[in-house]
């Protein structure tokens, strides 16, 4: 097995998938980061505002010295939440708090975030990030109350680290997955191209592999395989039709040639002319049926329109009723109103061919019953007779073009009646089924409900 280098299409597909994955990952992490920062800011500001409000209330009730004492006590005891305090006089000198001086970043009242040096109770100084609110206490004092917000800086650092690792992992995984997915698609195209070349070379049994995953590649493979199978069926049908047509045409042409030679030798023309006329009529029937079959297979969707199928069945039965009476057959009919989208001539051909086949092979004294009725998933046209029927192992074979069973080889016909009915049914989305009528043959054409027009 030879190694194949990655194709440009596979790499391009992998890069596109990776880029989309990276963008999606970056957006998701950014949204999460922004929402977390907003939540932390809201909590920190609420805590600072509550502490500031308490000190302002103390100032209003007891004065600035009481505020200074409160600040000193707060700085001296450990807290679950580390607060930053600074109270200065009018000249800017610190009165109480744990900040050495008023921050340069704070030049007016309000809520601010800044970085400064904070001293601990042991005298150690650290660079910390503070979110603070500043207020004026009368005309002589300023008060700063803040909360350490190092969590925000820590979160930012972790976000950057997580983003870098996530993008790296996503990029690697995206490249691998994208390359695998692109290669799978290209492998399918290679398999389809190879199968197409082999099929065109004459291997009509060639099919694409179906993995069983049920994904789009399996569905496309199944569609292509169905097309291959249909082409194989048509080719086999053409071969069978060619052989049968050659046999059916060769016999009457040979008889015509022999009769012409006999007529030339014996001088009699009456009987020869009559026999030749019969043979020529048989040839014309075969040609006409072949043309009907070709027209049925090339029916366009634009030819479809509303058709009263029940009326077509009634007209066909009325047309064949005198023939059935002449042969001593009991022909009955039972229909329900059905209107479908279809081609009137093809639907009439279905009914006429099934009736002609039933009358032709039902012995005198037999019966033929035609029914058209609704079922759960559609409606069905049935032509049932009491003739000899068709053996079960021959029912699929008998609808092949120009195929005639040995028992009917010497009767009139081209062997296309059932073939035309089957093609006309398939054009309308219906199916022709031949079963045993015990005795006789039951020919049923089932139409799906989607074909019916509900008035």
Image (cartoon, rainbow, N blue to C red):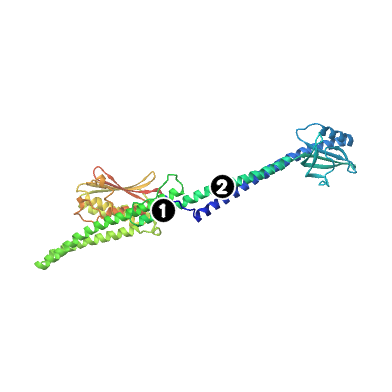
Q: Which mark, by number, is residue 4?
A: none
* Foreground tag (2 vs 1): 2
Between the C-alphas of marks 2 and 1, the distance is: 30 Å
Element type at marker 1?
helix
Extreme residue toward the left, this view: 266
Residue 223 place in picture, x, y as percent? 41, 51
Question: Which residue sits at x=29%, y=57%?
Answer: 238
| Placement of 46 over or under 230, stated as above or below | above
Residue 89 as seen in the image, left or right of residue 273: right
Extreme residue toward the top, this view: 77
28 or 316: nearer the viewer: 28
Judging by the rendered image, the residue that carries numbered circle 2 is 172
| Placement of 188 over or under 291, stated as above or below | above
Question: Which residue sits at x=28%, y=56%?
Answer: 239
| Placement of 5 over or under 267, stated as above or below | above
Question: Which is more N-terminal, label 1 or label 2?
Answer: 2
242 or 18: nearer the viewer: 18
Determine crowd level at label 1: few under 14, some 14-19, many 20+ residues with C-alpha closer than 10 A. some
Residue 205 place in picture, x, y as percent? 34, 51
Is residue 335 at all visible to an observer of this figure? no
Residue 407 place in picture, x, y as percent? 20, 50
Q: Which mark, by number, is residue 192?
A: 1
Determine crowd level at label 2: few under 14, some 14-19, many 20+ residues with C-alpha closer than 10 A. few
Element type at marker 2?
helix
209 or 448: nearer the viewer: 209
Residue 373 as seen in the image, left or right of residue 117: left
């Amino acid at each position: 097995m030879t190694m194949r280098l990655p194709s440009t299409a596979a790499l391009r597909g992998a890069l596109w998938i990776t880029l989309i994955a990276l963008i999606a990952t970056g957006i998701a992490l950014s949204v999460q980061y922004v929402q977390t920062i907003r939540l932390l800011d809201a909590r920190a500001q609420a805590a600072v505002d509550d502490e500031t409000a308490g000190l302002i209330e103390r100032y209003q009730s007891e004065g600035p010295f009481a505020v200074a004492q409160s600040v000193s006590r707060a700085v001296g005891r450990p807290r679950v939440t580390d607060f930053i305090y600074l109270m200065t006089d009018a000249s800017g000198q610190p009165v109480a708090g744990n900040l050495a001086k008023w921050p340069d970043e704070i030049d007016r009242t309000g809520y601010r975030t800044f970085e400064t040096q904070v001293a601990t109770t042991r005298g150690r100084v650290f660079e910390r990030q503070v979110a603070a609110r500043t207020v004026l206490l009368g005309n002589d004092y300023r008060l700063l109350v803040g909360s350490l917000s190092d969590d925000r800086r820590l979160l930012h650092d972790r976000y950057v680290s997580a983003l870098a690792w996530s993008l790296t992992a996503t990029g690697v995984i995206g490249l691998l997955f994208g390359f695998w997915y692109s290669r799978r698609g290209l492998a399918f195209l290679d398999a389809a191209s190879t199968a197409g070349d082999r099929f065109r070379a004459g291997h009509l049994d060639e099919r694409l592999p179906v993995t069983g995953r049920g994904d789009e590649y399996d569905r496309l493979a199944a569609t292509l395989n169905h097309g291959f199978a249909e082409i194989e069926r048509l080719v086999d049908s053409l071969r069978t039709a060619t052989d049968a047509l050659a046999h059916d045409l060769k016999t009457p042409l040979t008889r015509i040639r022999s009769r012409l030679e006999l007529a030339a030798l014996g001088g009699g023309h009456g009987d020869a002319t009559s026999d030749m006329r019969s043979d020529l009529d048989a040839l014309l029937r075969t040609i006409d049926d072949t043309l009907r079959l070709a027209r049925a297979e090339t029916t366009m969707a634009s030819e479809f329109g509303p058709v009263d199928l029940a009326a077509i069945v009634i007209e066909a039965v009325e047309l064949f009723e005198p023939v059935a009476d002449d042969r001593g057959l009991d022909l009955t009919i039972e229909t329900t109103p059905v209107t479908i989208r279809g081609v009137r001539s093809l639907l009439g051909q279905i009914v006429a061919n099934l009736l002609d086949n039933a009358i032709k092979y039902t012995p005198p004294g037999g019966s033929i019953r035609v029914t058209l009725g609704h079922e759960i998933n559609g409606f069905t046209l049935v032509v049932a007779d009491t003739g000899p029927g068709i053996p079960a192992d021959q029912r699929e074979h008998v609808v092949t073009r120009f195929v005639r069973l040995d028992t009917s080889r010497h009767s009139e016909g081209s062997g296309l009646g059932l073939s035309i009915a089957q093609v006309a049914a398939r054009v309308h989305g219906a199916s022709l089924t031949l079963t045993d009528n015990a005795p006789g043959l039951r020919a049923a054409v089932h139409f799906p409900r989607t074909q019916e027009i509900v008035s």
